[in-house]
Image (tube, rainbow, N blue to C red):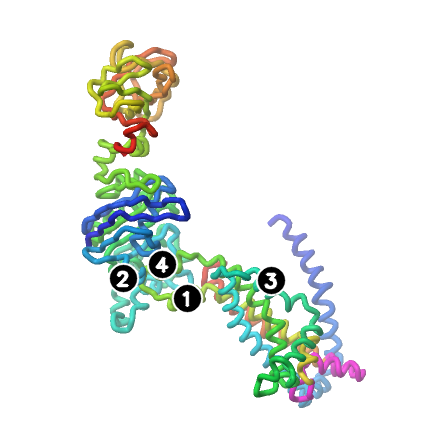
Amino acid sequence: MDLKIRDVRKEYGSFPALNGVSLDIRSGELVALLGPSGSGKTTLLRAIAGLEIPDSGRILFGDEDALAKPVQERNVGFVFQHYALFRHMKVFDNIAFGLRVRGRARRPAEADIRRKVLELLELVQLQGLENRYPAQLSGGQRQRVALARALAIEPQVLLLDEPFGALDAQVRKELRRWLREIHNETGHTTVFVTHDQEEALELADRVAILHKGDLQQVGTPDAIYDQPATPFVYAFIGDSSSLPIEVRGGQAALDGKALPLGRVDAPDGPARLHVRPQDVTFVAPGEGVALGRVATLRRLGAFRRADVDVGVRRSRIEVRLPPEAVFAEGEEVGLAFERFAVFPAEGAPGAARAA
Amino acid sequence: MPGFGLALGFTVLYMSLLVLIPLGAVVAWAASLGPTRLLAILTQTQTLNALKISFGISLAAAAVNAVFGLLLAWVLTRYDFPGRRLVDATVDLPFALPTAVAGIALAAIYAPNGWVGSLLPFKVAYTPLGIFVAMTFIGLPFVVRTVQPVLADVDRELEEASATLGAGRLTTVFRVVFPTLVPALLTGFALAFARAVGEYGSIIFIAGNIPNVSEIAPLLIITKLEGFDYAGATAIATIMLAMSFVILLVVNLIEAWSRRRLGHAR
C-alpha cells in the first residue's frame, strides 16, 4: 500500500508541530521518521494512524483519502512505545482483540481466530506463552505481543512509535534485527519513529529527518550520511564540527583571509563550513586549508581524538587520528579537509533557500 | 525488613485499642448469653426482618451507587465543563453533613407533600424505599472517590490501541477501560455497603420505622437498649458484625483476585 502525505500541517495552540510536510512512502518500504524531541515525528505518525487530525493537507492510502476515515476504519497496525497491552487479558486475547471486535459480518470464526493467533505467536517467537498475562512477560516479550496484536488485523500500514525506546540496550539491538527480519518476511509498508539515528540508519530503507516541524531530508541511509542536505542534518547525523566563514563571490574566507577551498556553492554573506572528524587530516603548518592549535588529545578505543582551535574565534574542530599519530597538545598544525559542506549561516539571507 | 517489628507492633496496638477490643467485648458478652438464648433472640420475626431490611437494602443501595458513582466519576474525570469543580466538591457533602440533617432534609423532600414526593405517584418517605434513598445518599461519595483517581490514571494509549484495532468507542469503554476499574469499583462498593449497614441517623427520619416493614437493625438495637434488653441488643449487634465481616471479606477476596489479574501485585 503506497502512502502519500501532502503538505500536512498541525498546530497545537500557536506551536507549529508540522509545517506542511510532504512524503511519499512506497508499498513494502520500511521508513524511519528521525528527529529530536519536538520535531513533529510522532505527530506525523499519529496523523497517519488517525489518532491526530491535521489542520490541513492530505494523507492517501493508495488512492484512498485516509483523512475521510476515522481511526477504526483505517486498518493501521500501531505499536506504542510503552506497549499499551490490555493488562486484564491474556496474551492470546490481546492478539485476538482486533479480530473479535469486528462486526458479525467480518468476524472470523473462533477456530480461525485461534489458528491466526497461534500463527502470529510463532512469527514473534512467543509460542506457548498465550495463557500468560502481560504482567508476567519481560519488556521485549511485551513489545512482541504488541506487534503480533497489530499484525493480527492485517493492517494496510504498520506504524511504530519509538518501539524500542523503553527497552534496554541489549534487547533493543536484538529486537531491531528481528523487526527487520519480520519486515522482510511479511512485507508490510512500515513507518517507525525514533530519535536514535543508529537505529534509523541500520533498520530503514529510507530515513526522513524532521526538525521543528519541517521535513529536512528524505533519503537512503547512505545519502543521509554522505550528502546531508541541510546544516541541521549535517550536525544531527554523525559527528561534525563547523567553522564560521565569510563567502564573497564563491570564495570562502576565515577571519578575512581567503581559504584555499576552490569555488564554494553558497551565496555571499556569513556561512558555516561543516566537516566530519574522519574527513580532516593533519598536515604541516602553512599547508592545507587552515591553521590550528591542538587543544586536547585523547585516546578513544581504536583511534585518537584531537580538538583543534582554529581562527581568532578559536572554533573547535574535532579530528579523528590513527592511534600511531604523534602530536602533542599545544602544537600548531595545518588542517586538510577531504570532504566538507558550506551552508549559509542561520539567520543569514539565503539560509532559508538551502534549508 | 528494617522497622517491621515496630510498625507491626504499632499496627496491632492501634487496631486493638480502636477496633478489636470494643468489638471483642460485644462478641464476648453475646457468647455469655449461651447458644439457646442467642438463637431464640435471632430467630424472632422482628429481628429477622430487620436484618433482611438492613442488609438487603444496603446491598441494593451499594449496587446503585456503584453504577451511578462510576458514571459520575467518568463525567468528572473525562469532561471539562463550567462548574466541574463545584460538582466535584458537592460529591463530598454526604460525608460532611450531620446525618440527622440529611435524614430530615430527605424526609421533608420525599414526604407525600414534599417537593419531590408530591410529584411521585408512589410513597417514598416512611417506606422501605425511603431507607433506600437515604442509604444511596450517604454511600455516594465512596464509589466516586475510589474510582476517580484510578480512572484518571488509565493510560490513554490503551484506548488508542483499541481504536487502531478497529474497536468502536463503546467496545473500548466496556472491554478495555471498565475491566481496569473493577478493583477500585469493588472497593467503593464495599465501603458504600458498609456505611449503609451501619447508618442510623439519616434513616430513622425517613424510614417510618414500622416493625417488620421499615425497621432497620441498628434501630432495633437502640429500641432494645432503651427497654433495658441488653442481651437482645448485644445478640443483634454480634450477628450484624459477623454478617458484615463475611460480606466484606468476600468482596475483598474478589478485589484482590481481580487486582492480581491486572498485574498490580504478585
> Which amino acid does the dot numbered 2 rest on?
Ile
- The quarter holding residue A321 reads top left
- Measured in 3D between alpha carbons, the distance from the residue under mark 2 to the one under mark 1, in whole angstroms, is 20 Å
**In the image, residue A176 lies at what x, y percent?**
29, 45
Question: Which mark, residue B89?
Answer: 3
Of labels 4 and 3, the one closer to you:
3
Whether the residues at callouts 2 and 1 have beta carbons within 8 Å, the answer is: no
B117 to A335, vertically: above or below: below
Question: Which mark, residue B173?
Answer: 1
Which chain is home to disc 3?
A: B
Q: Earlier in the sequence, mark 4 or mark 1?
A: 4
Please give the residue where the numbered disc 2 appears in the rendered image.
A153
Identity of the residue drawn at 74% across and 69% down: B22
- The quarter holding residue B63 reads bottom right
**In the image, residue A61 lies at what x, y percent?**
22, 55
Which chain is home to disc 1?
A: B
Q: Residues within 10 Å of mark 2 (few under 14, many from 20)?
A: many
Which chain is home to disc 4?
A: B
Q: Residues within 10 Å of mark 1 (few under 14, many from 20)?
A: some
- Measured in 3D between alpha carbons, the distance from the residue under mark 4 to the one under mark 2, in whole angstroms, is 12 Å
| Foreground pick, A39 / A344 | A344
Q: Earlier in the sequence, mark 3 or mark 1?
A: 3
Q: Is residue A213 left or right of residue A6?
A: right
> Which amino acid does the dot numbered 3 rest on?
Ala
Have a look at marks 2 and 1 and say if they share a chain: no
A87 to B59, vertically: above or below: above
Of labels 2 and 1, the one closer to you:
1
- Measured in 3D between alpha carbons, the distance from the residue under mark 3 to the one under mark 2, in whole angstroms, is 45 Å
B227 to A255, vertically: above or below: below
- Measured in 3D between alpha carbons, the distance from the residue under mark 4 to the one under mark 3, in whole angstroms, is 33 Å
Please give the residue where the numbered disc 4 appears in the rendered image.
B161
Q: Which residues are magenta?
A: B209-234
